[in-house]
Amino acid sequence: MTNEDMTIRNVDPTLPERPLAGRIALVAGATRGAGRAQAVELGRAGATVYVTGRTTRARASEVGRTTETIEETAELVDAAGGTGIAVPTDHLDEDQVRALAARIDAEHGRLDVLVNDLWGGEHLLVRSVFGKQSWETPLADGLRILELGVRSHVITAALLLPLLIRSDAPLHVEVTDGTARFNRRYRDNMYYDLAKNAPIRLAFGLAQELAPYGGTAVAVTPGFLRSEQMLAHFGVAEENWRDVVAHEPSFGISESPYYLARAVAALAADPDRADRWAGKSTSSGELARVYGVRDVDGSRPDAITYFEEVEFGGKEAPPEDYR
């Protein structure tokens, strides 16, 4: 299955057609992976989607990938039936984020959905986190992880929330790695643990602040994400990703970026989302069960439960039992 195939398939037949028509969304960090897919699926549901990131056709970010750009993401949103608007933005630069907010204000006067999917620190994990204690991580790299995974989220929330509360039903989505329950286990390194738990607390707190405005916030996580970078790491494409399973069995529970994206689009279209999810952290697998969403191959993987029960819990079961 090609990336084009993934972006033209319907989200789910049970959802009303274009339930987000007329809604204004921002996906911060939409260059690739789950951020790109969420932008596309929000657009497919009818939204106008501002997509931001640091990699453009003219300039690459520190991640070093030039094969995905925010302009391409905006075009995929358009192709899915939405309206994609690419705005190059470094979310660690307050002036750039203020300019983004001013543009959305001038063009629409409000924001309905804010997806905070900022990260871009994978290269630092390989270099300075995996297999290292925190004191073995170069301080500059550790602080950069916190900038990319925490400070960028705080800046974006602080400067976009004034637009979000003008909506009649504001939704703030924090994208991270792991649920609150899953992250009771130490995430291997102090810097990474902090970076991936902070968005969960952000969502918890912002749900309290948005409630008087008829809105809510929720933290979401993919399972084992089969992102463009992950596929490149294993030397496969979406069409043949199962070739990896022979030497990496846990890859059998992996999911495409569109799995979480379809679930988030369904959440955004749910009029009862505040009652269901306010301040909580949830996963693609849990959201998929609630909303009847499936991945691009028709499966419904639950990587979080697989890792809890099999990888960490000692249960003997193949990944296929959790798809």
Image (cartoon, helix red, strand yellow):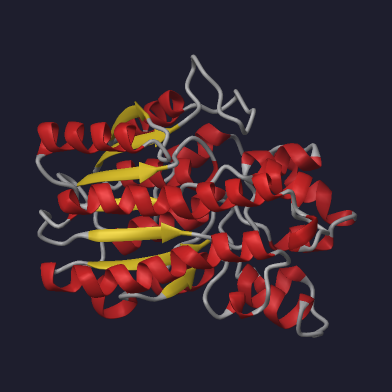
Q: Is residue 77 above or below residue 46?
A: above
> Picture coordinates of residue 4 (x, y %)?
51, 32
Q: Quadrant of residue 310?
A: bottom right
Q: Quadrant of the C terminus?
A: bottom right
Q: Is residue 82 left or right of residue 191?
A: left
Q: Quadrant of residue 132?
A: bottom right
Q: Is residue 127 above or below residue 170?
A: above
Of 150 and 176, nearer the camera is: 150
Q: Quadrant of residue 271?
A: bottom left
Q: Residue at x 33, y 28 (%)?
A: 87
Does residue 238 appear in this view? no
Q: Residue at x 55, y 43 (%)?
A: 33
Q: Quadrant of the N terminus?
A: top right
Q: Residue at x 75, y 42 (%)?
A: 240
> Picture coordinates of residue 25 (x, y %)?
26, 45
Q: Residue at x 69, y 41 (%)?
A: 123
Q: Is residue 182 left or right of residue 294?
A: right
